[in-house]
Amino acid sequence: MAGCYPCDMDKATKVKILSAAKAELMKHGLSTFVDQPPSVAEGGSGVVVTGCPNCRKRFQTVNQLMYHLADDVLPKILRSALDIAGEVG
């Protein structure tokens, strides 16, 4: 049975693209990080804020996380996928 989006890529390339996309996506999430370290607990003036610790981008809601993923992370994933696909074709 053919896939939904037929293309000329071999399975190894598709797996490589999927693995790279998944790895990048899994780096991002709604968590906490110390802004302007060290934290107050460590004698500094930094504060713990919510957001994406990987990007050090501040936000408080899941909706803002979704916008971060769509606006900041997805373009990076797509560029990587196109680079990988370009190596093949």
Image (cartoon, helix red, strand yellow):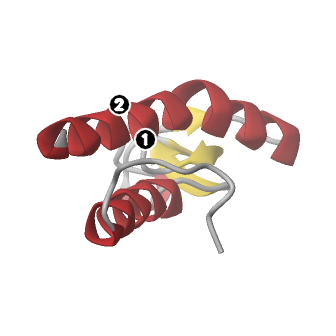
Judging by the rendered image, the residue that carries numbered circle 1 is 77
Image point (56%, 46%), residue name: 52
Q: Is residue 87 left or right of residue 2?
A: left
Looking at the picture, which amino acid does disc 2 mark? Answer: Arg
The crowd level at tag 2 (other Cα within 10 Å; few <14, some 14-19, many 20+) is few
Gap between marks 2 and 1, in whole Å? 6 Å
Residue nearest the viewer, comparing 63 with 88: 88
> Horizontal placement of 48 versus 39: left or right?
right
Q: What residue type is disc 1 on?
A: Ile
Q: Position of residue 18 (x, y in %)?
A: 43, 62
From this viewpoint, which residue is outermost toward the front? 1
Q: Is residue 81 above or below residue 1?
A: above
Per the image, the residue denoted by label 2 is 79
Marks 2,1: beta carbons within 8 A: yes
Q: Position of residue 27 (x, y in %)?
A: 45, 59
State the image quarter where residue 21 is shown: bottom left
